[in-house]
Amino acid sequence: MKTNEEKILKYISGRLNQEERITFEDELKKSDQLKNDYDNIRFKLDDFSMRNEFETNETYFANLLPRVYQRMDKKKRFWKFGSIYYLVPTASAIVILFLFLINTKTNYDTGYKDLANEVVNNLSDEEVSNKYSIELEADPADYILNQNNDDLSVQIPSDLELKSDSYTRLIGNPLANEYSPLRNLSENDLEVVYEKLNSTTSTKVRK
Amino acid sequence: MGIVQDNDFELINRFLSGEEVAFNLIVKKYQKKIYWHARQMMGNHLDADEVTQEVLIVIFNKLKNFNFKSSLYTWIYKIVTTRSLNQIRKKQIKRFFSIDNKEEIELQDKHDIIKELDAKEKLDKVKKILEKIPPKQRQIFIMRNFDDLSYEEISEITGKSVGGLKANYFHALKKVMELTNENK
């Protein structure tokens, strides 16, 4: 059977060449065993072509088209209105994100420009000294007093100068909130601000 | 069965000129062929129904691109086979991620359009064998055994050479016989 099966399957699938096919068909007429095996395989394969034997529920096919139209309508409606449910939140999220980014940038720019203008251009040395050195405790004298729990008896050295850590304190001091854009300044701009403060504060201390 | 053309081109032209009834006639003519091919490929009613609906929607939307070079039946068949293979892939992925599909089996049973128990059992037997054949071999096997298509027609649908199809069909037959003998 196994040898016959291979041959029969090759015949059925059309893999025999013309000569082999003619030989096979001759053999099929002569050999009962081959005929028997062939019929057997055909019978088994017929199980796979039995659609017409089934009694099906015809309502399914009758309702198929209306269901398809319904589905297409749903799709259309989705693209017309339903998509709003997705579109609106997505668009809102994008707008909010965009505004947030713009706002951050604007704050930064404004802060930077305001501060730069205020410190470097518009304020006099005296004003800068008064405003920044007091509010930011950048005045070395205040700093020493503060370090000594405001003990007024502490001697304040006459040759006081702004220490190098004043710059760090200026940036890190909570009181500097009002001037927090300082954090956003570039190294060069900070240097300018620092120089300005340094000179005015030193002037004040010297006074 | 073979490819039936009749007045297909006329129906398409009528549909393209705005007569929706023509589409209904096309559906009426081919819906069972579409369903049964999908059913054999998928092995159950629910998936076959999904594929059939998708195919009909694609036909409705894409008929305007029909080039009148092939028969409508071949064109539809291309869509059915592609959609069926896609659905099988989707199912394989779903199966990979889901542990229990008991509910799905119950649902399929409830909605099946075959009412007779004998027919159901027979179809189930076929399904169990077909699902063990690789999808592409299964496709050729169904087209040859179930839809009675010639190699030339299958070649036009799948874009494969006749020689390749014969080899595929031979291997599918061998596998089917092996499984049929095992199931005895």
Image (cartoon, rainbow, N blue to C red):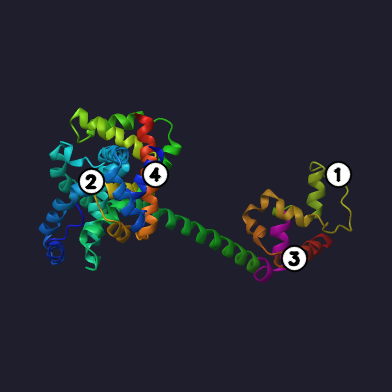
Chain-order first, disc 1 or disc 4: 4
Residue B1: give x, y in percent of width and height. 19, 51
Main secondary structure type of the part rendered in magenta: helix
Residue B51, magenta (yes or no): no
Query: Which residue is disc 2 drawn over?
Result: B35
Q: Residues within 10 Å of mark 1 (few under 14, many from 20)?
A: few
Find the magenta span and give its range: A119-134
The reply to whether callout 4 and callout 3 are in contact (CB within 8 Å) is no
Between B20 and B115, the one lying in front of the other is: B115
Measured Cα–Cα span from mark 2 to mark 3? 79 Å
Between B137 and A76, the one lying in front of the other is: B137
The amino acid at mark 3 is Glu
Disc 1 sits on a residue from what chain? A
Tag shown at residue A118: none
Query: Which residue is disc 1 drawn over?
Result: A153
Query: Which residue is disc 4 drawn over?
Result: A6
Disc 3 sits on a residue from what chain? A
Residue A122, magenta (yes or no): yes
The amino acid at mark 2 is Tyr
Name the quadrant of the N terminus of chain A: top left
Name the quadrant of the C terminus of chain A: bottom right
Chain-order first, disc 4 or disc 3: 4
| Image quadrant assignment for residue A128 | bottom right
